[in-house]
Image (spheres, grey):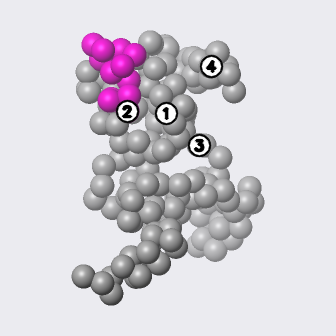
Amino acid sequence: MTASENSEALSQRLADSGLRSTPQREVVYTVLLKKRDHPTADEVYARVKSELPTISLATVYNCLETLVQCDLVRAVNFERGPTRYCPNLRPHAHFHDESTGRTHDIDLPPTVLTELNRILPQGFDAKSIEITFRGQAKESSEHRAAGSGHS
């Protein structure tokens, strides 16, 4: 999508929710789309500050909350860590690299929700799923194992 298509999609989704597009919401959304690295609100704030120097952290939190409520962004939580924000709305899981703290999207087959609904108790139907894999990149664990024998 182009920047203007993203802006139109944002405006339409906000309008559908009875909200209007604001420069702050547009910049926060654009920042999330530019670098899809699952940033925290503080990281989004730092990125937005260069474009909107007067924006407050509270405004960034409000914008993120609005984007989540309008289904433009997913809030991703890893145990006790800060909430991270993901603009990828396709069915996907996350791989959280415990050695680097980075989060990667893992594509899932489009039929995964249908398949997983089959294992739910009778009378229940999931509208979404959250799957998180935790671990580390193989080269990270091999590198540490090789280095751990030497002090």
Q: Secondary structure at mark 1?
A: helix
Residue visible at 66% across and 56% down? 107
**Disc 1 from disc 3: Cα separation:** 10 Å
Residue visible at 32% across and 29% down? 46
Q: Position of residue 139 (x, y in %)?
A: 50, 71
Mark number, residue 64: none
- Residue for badge 1: 32
Q: Earlier in the sequence, mark 1 or mark 3?
A: 1
Q: Residues within 10 Å of mark 4 (few under 14, many from 20)?
A: few
**Disc 2 from disc 1: Cα separation:** 7 Å
The amino acid on which the numbered mark 2 sits, given as a three-letter code, is Val
The amino acid on which the numbered mark 1 sits, given as a three-letter code, is Leu
Residue visible at 44% across and 25% down? 28
Count the marks.
4
Mark number, residue 3: 4
Location of residue 39 with respect to 3 vertically, above or below: below
Depth order, front residue of 150/134: 150
Mark number, residue 44: 2
Q: Which image quarter is the C terminus in?
A: bottom left
The amino acid on which the numbered mark 3 sits, given as a three-letter code, is Asn
**Disc 3 from disc 4: Cα separation:** 16 Å
Q: Secondary structure at mark 3?
A: loop
- Whether residue 51 appears in magenta in the rendering, the answer is yes
The amino acid on which the numbered mark 4 sits, given as a three-letter code, is Ala
Q: Which image quarter is the N terminus in?
A: top right
**Stretch of the chain drawn in magenta:** 44-55
Q: Secondary structure at mark 4?
A: helix
**Disc 4 from disc 1: Cα separation:** 12 Å
Q: Residues within 10 Å of mark 2 (few under 14, many from 20)?
A: many
- Whether residue 129 appears in magenta in the rendering, the answer is no
- Residue for badge 3: 88
